[in-house]
Amino acid sequence: MIENISAVVLAKNNDNTIKKTLDSLVNFEDVVVYDNGSTDKTMEITSSYKNVNLIQGEFKGFGWTKNRAVSFTKNNWVIIIDSDEVVDTGLFHILQTKKLNDNTVYQLNFKAYYKDIQVKYCGWNNQKIKRMYNKSVTSYNMNDVHEDIISDNLKIEQLGGNVEHYSYHSISQFVIKADHYSTLFAKNNVGKKSSSPLKAVLNGIYSFIKTYFFKRGFLDGYIGLIISFSHMVTNFYKYIKLYELNKEQK
């Protein structure tokens, strides 16, 4: 049992993945699931875990919402796990015995999956992401998207083991997330960044080329094509939505 680290999970309509996530956290004494409006069976599934504190609250961008969720934890040390992610046994055993340094932010290694197929290219595999920190020392920034743990003047240490990320289970989910993330990006940058239809087109094209060719997405077969095209669409919509919002502000 891990008693000194609280796990925090943001959730909304994740009934197809959250059981796997919570099963991997069953030996954490304190798990906070922060649900922001699920209409499926996510909360019903979550409520069946005795070590989980289920909180219902608002979503105000990823940075603000993660900080809000963390405020409900019992411990100062927190690890952030998404509701489509799984802590593997290697990482769990490291967390059981790791002597933590208050002035260190810990990075985790991520293995990405489409359905149950590992994505080995596209820039998705073996990503290193900061996910564990002492909440009395630092927090997330307030970015709506691309939120990050503030690590100025702090050490960063990579932990062994892996987090398995089961982020997409259908092509439709790529479409939904492209719309969601591009809208957040545009709202977060309106009046701050310039954009144009040409910039939107060029960013989209470059994203496809970068993912499919430079990051060898073609080696992932048809999944690599889906991911590369999704990156293209997302980046196009990010900048065309920003262009539209900037125009409306004038």
Image (tube, rainbow, N blue to C red):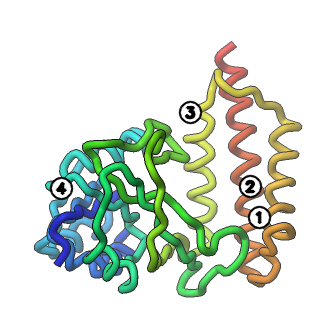
**Up-down relation of residue 127 to residue 58 (above or below):** below
What residue would you read off at disc 1? 229
Q: What amino acid type should be assigned to the residue bearing mark 1?
A: Phe
What residue would you read off at disc 3? 188
Q: Nearer the viewer, residue 143 or 127?
A: 127
Residue at image coords 71%, 45%: 237
Q: Quadrant of residue 118?
A: bottom right
What residue would you read off at disc 4? 75
From the image, state whether disc 3 or disc 2 is nearer to you.
3
Residue at image coords 79%, 83%: 219
Q: Nearer the viewer, residue 33 or 162?
A: 162
Q: Residues within 10 Å of mark 1 (few under 14, many from 20)?
A: many
Q: What amino acid type should be assigned to the residue bearing mark 2?
A: Val
Task: Identify the element where label 4 is drawn.
Answer: loop
How far apart marks 4 and 3 lie (CA) works out to 31 Å
Q: What amino acid type should be assigned to the residue bearing mark 4?
A: Asn
Q: What amino acid type should be assigned to the residue bearing mark 3?
A: Asn
Q: Residues within 10 Å of mark 4 (few under 14, many from 20)?
A: some
Q: Position of residue 72 (x, y in %)?
A: 18, 49
Q: Position of residue 53 (x, y in %)?
A: 15, 61
Which quarter of the image is occupied by the N terminus?
Answer: bottom left
Q: Residues within 10 Å of mark 3 (few under 14, many from 20)?
A: some
How far apart marks 1 and 2 lie (CA) works out to 6 Å
Tell whether 174 sits left or right of 209: left
What residue would you read off at disc 2? 233
